[in-house]
Amino acid sequence: MPESASLLQAAAEQAERLAEPKAIRPQPSAQDNKIWKAALQRYYDELANGGYKGHAIDKDLWDIKDPEELLDQIRTFPASERAPEDLNALKKALLGLSDFAAVAALALGMNGRVAAVIWGSIRLLLVLSRPAFPKIIQMLKDLETTLPKYKNYEKHLPMTPALEDALCDVYTDIILFCAQAITFFRNNPNFARSTTIWSQFNRKFLGTITNLQNHSRRVDEEVDIIRMTREADSAETLNVIANMKTFSLSDQAKLPCHILPYGLNPQFLERSKEVSQVRTTLDPSSQEDECELKVMAIHGLGGVGKSQVALHYANMSMKVFEVIVWIPSETHVKMSQAIANLASKLGLPRNDTDVKEEDMQMVIKVKDWLNTSGRTFLLIFDNVEDINVVLPVWPSSNRGSILLTTRYSSIASKRTSNILHLQSFTPEAGKKALSALAGLPAESEIEVAALSKICRFLGGLPLAIVQISQFIRGRGYNYEEFLQLYEKSATKIHARGETPEYNHTLSTVWVMSLEKLTPDAENLLSLLAFFDPDLIFERLLTNSRASLTDGCLEFLFDDFDFGDAVGALLKLSFINRSSAQKSLSVHRLVQYTVLSNLPKDKATLFLTATIQLLSFGFPNKWGETGDQQGHGYESWETCREVLPHVQRLIEVTEKQKFNPQYADKFAELVFRVGTYLWETEQPTTALCLFNFGLSLGLDPEGPTCNPAVRMLGHVALDVAQPRVALKAYQTTLAARLKLFDSKDPKIADVYDSIACAYTEIGDVAQALEILDKSKAIHLSNNPRRMSRTLAIYAMTYLRAGKPDEALQALKDCWDLQGKTEAQICQSRYPKHSGDIVLLARIYHMQNKKEEALELASKTITIRKGILGSKGPRVADSMFIVAGMLRESGKDALARKLLREIIDMAQGMIEMQGHLARSLWTLGSILEKTGEIDEGAGLKRSAREVRGKMQGRETEDNDTDESFSKLVGFMLW
């Protein structure tokens, strides 16, 4: 029987069962399902909230019995309002809804009235929304795709209360959306003229889609449980089923976990073929023997729609993957921040201090979870410019899929042969897209010719099509009018001719739109051009403590005026706003256009303001002295938020050749963020920031730069370059002696650093002489400021082989701080964990082997709690413990720890010394135990790693001592 015939037959049977007259609302009977009656009442309540009384709609609601009857009525619409392909798409969506309605009717114990509400509502909203007919059909298609997989249900599947509730929730969401849509179009007959009104409706629809996805997932889960229960034939299986939900709640990770920047885009330009190709490649396999990670790359011109295809696939795949995460991948910082956010959303096990854990450690933690959890996941690495950025988190699990977007074909082919070269639209597809987005059908031959010519000029680039359509709408032009302007101003609109590149395609369009902005909105957009575009917290912009003096930025500190400026930019789609995070984001091309058109005086103004705002975005301890060394671990989280924006400022000043008005303020900001990077074990990146700040033309001996020169020494010590550190410290000392009296405590602070460098070099006599100078200064000022000096005394005595003197110095250090050993162990100050490492080594030298091993083992846990589970200092503690175990004859345990260090150090530039040292030591142990070949191979690897290390200061001898010097003597 043909499909239409079967539908009509079903409709006839339903009509026969309906006793109420046509066009009159059926009165619920006592036998009607109470849940359905409640859903129907919510439907009428929603209509009433929108000013639409129930009796006014009943005449249109109950007289359509099936999708075919509805389609017949839609076919009576004027041909100009509905294309054949639109009707085909509508038919598919209606048939999907019909299948669901049948299941819902079964669940609710009802008849055709369940579906009649849907068909009548859809007819009414299509009548009211005729100018947006294609958009509404797309919404119905999106709605239909979120419904449960009802075709897989058995015909006689038993109905449980949980399944009934879930199905009714899905049904309720559908009819409530219909009610909202009806009242929206009825109350806004001119909606097509207002993008703001349409955006409000679209946001409601996206909320409906989210709810439907959640409820549909519940339906599928309940069906799976029912099926498994029917198939269970043992007490053990039944027990597993009974405990399924309990297990999922007690599981480590919080699943499902979907992190995407935006929901479904109703204006997504049709890429069904490409999305289908992605789905075929990346959707999880039903075969148990799947053995490979699924990877696909999308590359093409900037603006061709790579990210939109990826985002659309991700939003449509929430029922397929348990974890979906969008990972901006332009830089290491952005990638690692996204991974840190994923770890937080998953709720991976962490200590109470792990919220401050440095991003490098979180990348490794998430990678381990992806590889071992057995969960299905989809990672989208967006806008990859360097494949090495994403490799640290690249998993190997056969349960996962990866989608990578990039402009570069060479990057696309590095990790997969599944490559989609996304092309611009064909001329016909481009015309259809521009016509739909502009809301302007080409009805005359002149208009058709003009539209064709415009699309040829645009080259089918999706981003250009979107922006040009907005320009046409904004000016109220027809195609001929726009074409006349375009032909006169081609060089302004597209600087590179008929095949425009990404940057130049849109620059002039934005300049035209910029002219419409209010002064406050224009100034806000100019300010945002200096921030990292992806996540700009509003609190960074509106912090009144920044005390901006220019009157044009006063609006930032007035909630109402600031809201007006944000609203103006949202209206023209220059920015996006997350109400949940209270943050803004701005497109890079908008930033580029703004910066390119800023006069020098304005650029200086906004650059200076950005520096000032960021400077007050996190605590400032630069140049301060105190008992605790460093910037302040308590503010690591806020430092991490500011870091991308400081890196953006550096990029802008270098590329645009901007000169900050107050270079000292800019340098100080850069130095503060560099200090955070050093504290969180990222010395390589920290070094780049310190060098940039020192290149701003300030006096290197002045009060701003002098502490930064000292920080260069700290970075050098962390990478086992004590002679480089000594030079930096001596330069710092020479400068400070010009600024301060020779007996000033600030001089003593530098003496401490110099002594530390001498100790690392091995010149303990010189170190002790310098420490005596520092001690004398403190005694003449404030002896209680001498705790760090005493700690370095302890380190130096240990290096000199004098453990008793070292122990006394360390205890004196703690006494000055008023702390006991137990308090030091519990402290969150990172340097205190180094004190415990030092104490363990002192005990070991005093032949207190068991106490030393116990204490050294404790430092592994302490450092993991402060700095993260993996990193240079954790590796150093593990190596010390391995050495103690090796001495006590416990080679097996020592080997295990060394292999863990080797695993964690792979690919981390900051840990190459640890990697080489551990490879060599493990090789020595294996050779000793007769595993000659493997041991020799490890030693070869150790030499290879050492050979690639830059700036090493030790001789390349193949001895344990030589390899040990690749890591500092003491890592505090």
Image (cartoon, rainbow, N blue to C red):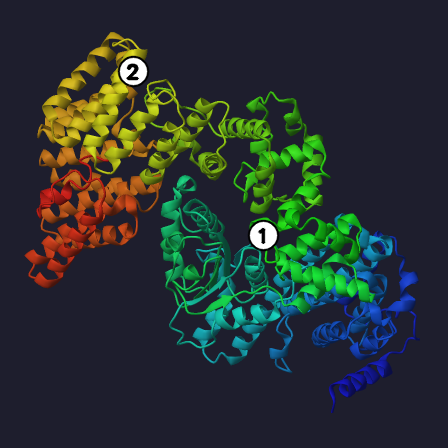
Name the residue rendered at 74%, 50% in the picture: 485
The image shows residue 285 at horizontal and vertical percentages of: 47, 74
* Rendered image: mark on residue 388: none
Residue 848: x %, y % from top left: 11, 36
Instruction: Please rate how many residues cluster around mark 2, counting C-alpha atoms within 10 Å: few if below 14, some from 14 to 19, many from 20.
Output: many
Q: Is residue 288 above or below residue 755?
A: below
In the orientation shown, which residue stands out farthest toward the bottom?
1
Q: Are marks 2 and 1 in contact (CB under 8 Å)?
A: no
Q: CA distance from mark 2 to mark 1?
A: 55 Å
Say above or below: 957 vs 541.
below
Quadrant location, the C terminus: top left
Q: Which residue is mark 2?
A: 736
Q: Is residue 338 left or right of residue 488?
A: left
Q: Is any atom of residue 198 visible in this view?
A: no
Give amino acid for label 1.
Answer: Arg
Tag 1 or tag 2, which sits nearer the N-term?
1
The vertical placement of 330 against 669, above or below, is below
In this rendering, the label closer to the viewer, 2 or 1 = 1
- In this rendered view, identify the residue nearer to me: 70 or 507: 507
* Residue closer to the observer: 502 or 75: 502
Please state the horizontal and vertical placement of residue 830, each as a whole percent of the image.
32, 33
For this orientation, the residue located farthest to the front is: 488
Say whether residue 23 is left or right of residue 293.
right
SS class, disc 1:
loop
Q: How many marks?
A: 2
| Kind of residue indicated by mark 2 | Arg
Query: Dot 1: within a 10 Å radius of its alpha carbon, few (fewer than 14), some, or many (20 or more) residues?
Result: some
Label 1: which residue? 496
Q: Is residue 564 left or right of residue 56?
A: left
Label 2 SS: helix
Residue at horizontal 17%, vertical 18%? 770
Horizontal arrangement in the rendering, residue 76 relative to residue 83 (left or right): right
